[in-house]
Image (cartoon, grey):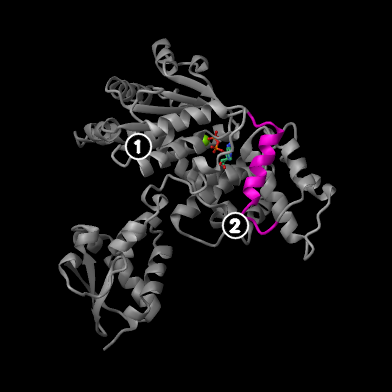
Amino acid sequence: METAIKDNWTQIIEFLRDNYDVLNILYRTWILPLEVISESDSEVTIAIDESKQGDITGLIDKKYRIPLQTSIEAITGKTVSITFVSRNSQNEEKGVSSYYNSEDQKTKTLEEKYIFLRSGHSFDNFVVSSSNRLAHAAAVAVAENPNGQIYNPLFLYSGPGLGKTHLMHSISRYILENHPEYKLLYTTSEKFTNDVVESIMDNKQNKSALPNLRDKYRNVDVLLIDDIQFIIEKKSTLQEFFHTFEELFQNGKQLVISSDKPPSEMEGLEERYKTRFSSGLPVDIQPPDYETAMAILKLKQTNEDIQLSEDILSYIASNARSSIRDLEGAYTKVKLLSKLSGPDREITQEMVENALKDIINENSTVNLTAEYIIDVVCSHFNVDKDRLLSERRTKEISYPRQICMYLCSEYTSLTQQVIAEKLKRKNHTTVNHAVKTIKDDLLVDNELQNTINVLKKKLNVN
Ligand code: ADP
Ligand code: MG
């Protein structure tokens, strides 16, 4: 029996993923569970497991028949026609083993089920100190009792990089783990805005778009919305949010909001909503003191192979404390320096000072660095920096990468060649192409405009 396709299946689907920019989540949901049941020189039969994937033969056929054919041809050199068959593994005694079996389902981590969650973000690795004690305590209280009765809304505010998102993810994780009966939705105001804009547009054709949106956001027990400041300027979105807020609030549902400032200072916000937002517990997070910064660095260092000396940690903690994101950025940079400095990994204070020049700079906000832009973009899209700088070409990674190049080109004085080096690309034509792509897309893509605006605010540029 021919088995070339089956034998090379992993390669085939990876080829498909990388060359057709299949998003990871789609890859996991649609492609990974597919299984080759039989093949000949000219034909292949692929099974779709209805009990795991639902009745999606039509969808797979429409979207992936040709990409699959092409990928099979690229890897095995065979030109085949594909038949998809649907089957239900639950009714089988012993079928071909399924990749996506229920054991996998059970062992799926929360991160896999809820893609917004970042693995480092939990109460366990949140360092508590005087600068964030109240915010932390309130977050834990709400996570333990997400019934809208303790603090509602819980309103967290602070400057950038001080732990708001970390706390919101921690609350979400805690509730998902300990109160699975609560229906929870975490969103950013950017995502909310995009959803609203999209439904308003779709609603012209399809009258169920707006009701669907409302159903999504109002039919929950806990709603967390991150970085609310970004929706204040958008009238229709703001209104939609207020209605959502009001309905949930009236029904005693739990709300958690984060913002860069307290409700009272949010310009353009109607008085009654300032009052509403302040009615639960508005609580701020301050930059860490020296001891807290040290504690955070030491926590980061626990699982690392490279151990920086106390003096060096102390230098970082004393100098890069205005934001924990900067603190982490400085730490990562010095760690890299140490890694590159040869077998004894000796680094001097001077080397450290030099490496951190642009992070530890009074005016660092006006002197944007490529590293900082990359950090902010990675955190925004929730992608790993190593993956962003890798060769991967999936859209999920390549689009944020192109956005980095665009932002570096617009908001730093670096040349395209240097930007290419910072992003670990071979030459400047990649940067040139990325900048052009983003500029072109910006002319027509509302969602992208919104994303870039949010990123610009995060980077503090106009
Ligand atoms: P914000 O949402 O306020 O801009 P983030 O929650 O994204 O800030 O925090 C920036 C970085 O600092 C994240 O990597 C986060 O894990 C880390 N961080 C913030 N506060 C703490 C803390 N108290 N302990 C440990 N890490 C922290
Ligand atoms: Mg945040």
Quarter of the picture holding the N terminus: bottom left
Q: What kind of residue is marked 2?
A: Thr
Which sits earlier in the primary sequence, circle 1 or circle 2? 1
Q: Badge 1 is on which residue?
A: 185
Residue 70 in the image: state x and y as whole percent.
34, 71
Find residue 336 and report its horizontal and vertical position in percent: 70, 55
Q: Is residue 298 left or right of residue 233?
A: right
Q: Which is in the foreground here, disc 1 or disc 2?
A: 1
Question: For the residues marked 1 and 2, what is the alpha-carbon distance in whole angstroms?
Answer: 41 Å
**Where is residue 18, by image quadrant?**
bottom left
Q: Is residue 73 left or right of residue 361?
A: left
In the picture, the disc for residue 267 is none
User: Observer-nearest residue: 335 or 14?
Assistant: 335
Q: Nearer the viewer, residue 261 or 13?
A: 261
Give the magenta-colored segment's residue range.
287-306
Q: Secondary structure at mark 2?
A: helix
- Which residue corresponds to the image point at 53% horizontal and 50% vertical from the top-left? 402
Query: In this view of the protein, which residue sits in the foreground, 433 or 126?
Result: 126
* Residue 175 sits above or below residue 157 on the image: below
Q: Main secondary structure of the magenta part?
A: helix
Q: Which residue is mark 2?
A: 429
Q: Quadrant of residue 86?
A: bottom left
- Residue 461 is situated, as x and y percent measured from the top left of the image, at 60, 32
Is 297 magenta? The answer is yes
